[in-house]
Amino acid sequence: MLAATARVTRDLDVAEECVQDAYVAALGAWSRDGVPDRPGAWLTTAARRNALNVMRRARTLQSKLPLLMGPEADEMPDLDQDAIPDDRLRLVFTCCHPALARDAQIALTLRLVCGVATGDIASAFLVPEPTMAARLTRAKKKIAAARIPYTVPEAAELPARLDAVLTVIHLLATTGHTAPSGDELVRVDLLDRALDLARMLTALLPDDREVRGLLALLLVHQARRTTRTDAEGRLVLLEDQDRSSWDRGAIAEAHRLVDAALRAGPPGRFTLQAAIAALHAQAPSTAETDWRQIVTLYGELLARWPSPVVALNRAIAVSMVDGPAAALPEVEALARDERLAGYRYVPAARADMLRRLGRHDDAAAAYREALALTANRAEREFLEARLAQLAVD
Amino acid sequence: MAQYAVLIFERETADEMPAEVLDAHGRLPERIAEAGGRIVAGMALEQSGTATAIRGDLVTDGPFIESKEALAGVFVIEARDLDHALQLARMTPIVEGGVEVRPLIGFDVPEAA
């Protein structure tokens, strides 16, 4: 509804107000006359009518606000049911425009596409509500002042712009949030929101392989969700997760999506990440995972996405196939890579490989390095246990 | 149509700007017009060493902000929206640096009295 109204107003704040007014009007009208046959259409029509009135008033006042006033604002076109899904797509591409900073893209998508309240978004990202409100206001001002267009990008731009949208949705899913303490903290289930968005995109862009790849990746995250934390909300590592509790239905759906995406053409980075996650998900244990195939997939991923984190993950997989001696030189090189400075998984991976090679003094030093960078309690306990074990051996 | 400033930032060297870059700048208005935009005005600045900055009472030699890439020129374009402005701005010939695209509140050249 917001999307359809924004198409008239081109200003997101005004569109939000028109939508709210429509709801208020509905409460009055429907309690008098009963609920109409198509309440959604009634509400959308009411919101758009409000929006047109606002636009006419604004023009009469000769406002200098940089609202885009296209010729369509003059008449109210028939409510085209097919156009409404396109409006949601326009909205999500606008929220994820590269001219907006990543944290603004994420906040705006949650607020405007998912309808999450500002306070809840603030809690999820552990910032005070006024900070989040200011972030949203700045972003909307940028959209209006710079005239970020409310459109689905042209074909030439679409792959890059879609990658940004998929990245935002993926970030939503993987952002941790604090475990609830008593009833005070409001939890926003970001993974649920991300899944909703991924499903929406799959419906709106059914031919896109990367969209399916992202959905598959999120389904695997979802399948393992209940086992990622223990009863006290502490992180549980992959090798310790109770695999029998994983949602096999979600994993099966993820497999179907990955297979379809891989068969349809050269895989993009989300499809590859999904394929790797699916391999982990289908293995009965860490030891029985198809690490060889995972190494191949990470190689493909690295070719498309030369990220040092991907290189590290590939090296870890290599150590599972060819042993730690084969992988250690790569990890040592990554330890010198500036981009990974402060990334705790580099010394942690090094420590593990040195331990497996029997180089206990070097491993101990690396575990201490990792501990200095690690705040998470479950991860610290794991590293400390490994360190203690070295002293005993 | 909306108006945007395109600020050109270039790494300054002792060398002259290459002839092909100067030619490309000369052809820019035409290329922008072909892409549905318009150059309204353009300014080419002398090197940043020739600038003088005033901050309150203090006059100093050099640009207001010292930076790796110096402001080399500014031009004003008309575009439909930001995406169009970015598409046009990308046509700017750059040796080593980039451009900033900023929407204008207004652009006015007063008539000579």
Image (cartoon, coloured by chain):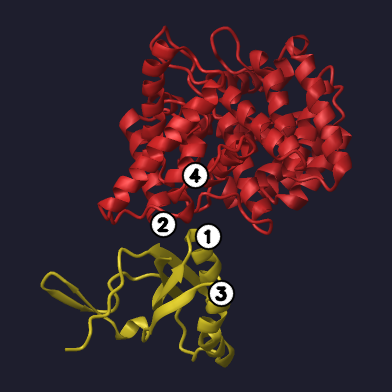
Chain colours: A red, B yellow
Mark 3 and mark 1: Cα distance apart in space: 13 Å
Q: Residues within 10 Å of mark 2 (few under 14, many from 20)?
A: many
Single out the mark in the foreground, 4 or 1.
Answer: 4
Tell me what residue is drawn at x 14 percent, y 74 percent: B58
Q: Dot 1 lies on which element? A: helix
Please state the horizontal and vertical placement of residue B69, each as a whole percent of the image: 43, 72
| Residue assigned mark 2 | A146
| Residue assigned mark 4 | A7
Q: Nearer the viewer, residue A139 or A184?
A: A139
Tell me what residue is drawn at x 62 percent, y 50 percent: A161
Q: What amino acid type should be assigned to the residue bearing mark 4?
A: Arg
Q: What amino acid type should be assigned to the residue bearing mark 3?
A: Met
Q: Specify which label sits upstream in the sequence, 4 or 2.
A: 4
Regarding residue B59, the answer to whether it shows in the image is: yes
Report in which chain the residue with disc 1 lies.
B
| Residue assigned mark 3 | B91
Report in which chain the residue with disc 3 lies.
B
